[in-house]
Amino acid sequence: MAFTRFKRILLKLSGEALMGDQGFGISPDVIKYVAEEVRSVFDLGVQVAMVVGGGNIFRGIAAGSYGMDRVSADNMGMLATVINSLALQDVLEKRGIQTRVQTAISMHEVAEPFILRRAIRHLEKGRVVIFAAGTGNPYFTTDTAAVLRAQEIHADILLKATKVDGLYDSDPSIYKDAKFIERINYAEVLEKQLGVMDLTAISLAMVNHLPLVVFNLRGKGNIKKVVCGEKIGTRIDK
């Protein structure tokens, strides 16, 4: 068995990552790929918690920009994360991985309410826990929810899965001379507004010294490489 640097991780996925190239909804191929990637670290004995966004179905911020009330829009966005979480739960359990979805908004018929002690117990029993519905509050992103839940469960690290290899000092799709950033501290991310996470999430991670790794989800085996200590993506810490 491979050596793992972390006992307990929180994996943050954007909703957009689940739609693949189809532009909307959930791609069956992508969600199966994500499940296999999660399994690769789960089989090493790593305790895995997850937070997934809902942007592939509905984005509260975008809806607010064309006149919808922000609170209503954010509530819809939180419900979209529940749809994604239930889809992930289904595909993980079909691979023999016991999974529990806990939501910040009560909906007992489809998922457990978020109860911290129960979530930790699930992790200790070898179950994947997916935290849905963000923080349960409007105006807070799923990035902030991911940092909050990572702190609450005492995760060793937060893994932010994206479509790019990590952070650059400028947009690599625009500037050919953009330089890849292998390691950076929280204050620099805030100062330069690099946009990897919203400012609230980065600030919360900084105050609580939660290390982050930003990496490319599309690189097969990248989650396992991070967990095993390989230098993948960009590390953000103190």
Image (cartoon, grey):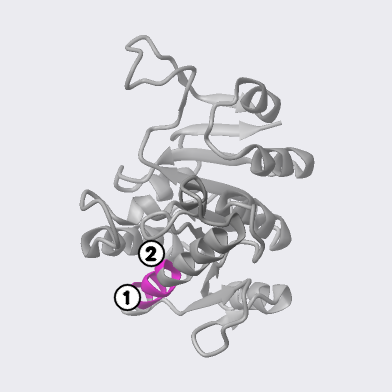
Q: Earlier in the sequence, mark 1 or mark 2?
A: 2
Give the spatial CA distance, label 1 vs label 2: 8 Å
Q: Nearer the viewer, residue 40 or 49?
A: 49
86 versus 22 height, above or below: below
Q: Secondary structure at mark 2?
A: helix
Give the label on residue 39, or none.
2
Q: Position of residue 65 (x, y in %)?
A: 49, 45
Q: Residue drawn at (65%, 56%), measured in percent from left and top?
A: 150
Q: Which residues are magenta?
A: 84-92
Image location of residue 229, percent across then percent down: 50, 41
Q: Quick check: 186 left or right of 15?
A: right
Residue positioned most to the front: 67
- Label 1 environment density (alpha carbons within 10 Å; few <14, some 14–19, many ≥20): few
Q: Residue 58: x, y in percent?
A: 42, 58
- Given the current orientation, which residue lies at the most extreme right position? 207
Q: Are marks 1 and 2 in contact (CB under 8 Å)?
A: yes
> Which amino acid does the dot numbered 2 rest on?
Arg
Residue at screen point 65% across, 44% down: 201
Looking at the rendered image, the quarter that the C terminus falls into is: top right
- Residue on which the image places disc 1: 95
Between 70 and 204, the one lying in front of the other is: 70
Callout 2: 10 Å neighbours few (<14), some, many (20+)?
many
Q: Is residue 124 visible?
A: yes
